[in-house]
Image: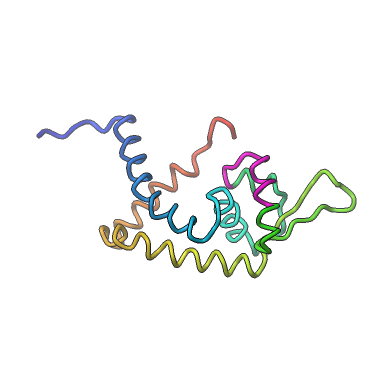
Amino acid sequence: MPDEQITAARLGRVIVQAGRRLDVPFGQVLDRRGITRNAWWLLTELYRTRAEEPATVGEHARRSGLPPSSATAVTEQLARADLARRWRPHDNRRVAYVVITDVGAAFVESVRGDLEKAVADLYVLYDEAQRRALHDLLLILVDAPRESD
């Protein structure tokens, strides 16, 4: 069969199919741990930025790709579970800041271990160079500006 042209639609389909293949074990791990996808995305953003200056819930929502209202609800859930700490400055009650707690950081590390085990059979399909190339290519897609940005 001659090489088929890699169109945007064809590439998009492959990316979506790959995402679906990864989504099943990902969802199973999060379900077992009792955390929603939105909560996981926000919590891992907090983990990634834990050494930086605190940022607002809105800024973390933007970085996580979540609607602000979803991030607000998730932040409250994470705070109730002691996975994050949320506060409002005294001089501006319209803004809320959020940071990950030590309990939250330990939770992220533990869940990541479960996720690694859940997709280990997919990970071994690639050698180190292929994993790096795939990571770098997908990062371009993830970091590309969106129409809503």
Q: Residue at x 59, y 61 (%)?
A: 47
* Colour approach in the figure: rainbow
Work out whether 114 lies above or below 139.
below
The quadrant of the picture occupied by the C terminus is: top right
Which residue appears at 67% of the width and 54% of the height?
77
Q: Within the magenta stretch, is there residue 66?
A: yes
Query: Residue 70 falls in which quadrant of the image?
Result: top right
Q: Main secondary structure of the magenta part?
A: helix
Which image quarter is the N terminus in?
A: top left
**Res 6 quadrant in image:** top left
Q: Where is residue 29 drawn, in percent x and y?
A: 45, 59
Q: Provide the residue span drawn in magenta.
A: 64-75
* Spot occupied by residue 22 in the image (x, y as percentages of width and height): 37, 51
Residue depicted at 38% across the width and 47% down the height: 137
Q: Residue at x 67, y 66 (%)?
A: 101
Residue 126 falls left or right of residue 44: left
Residue 107 x %, y %: 56, 66
Residue 90 on the magenta segment? no
Q: Nearer the viewer, residue 83 or 28?
A: 28
When the figure is inspected, residue 4 is found, relative to residue 74, above or below; the finding is above
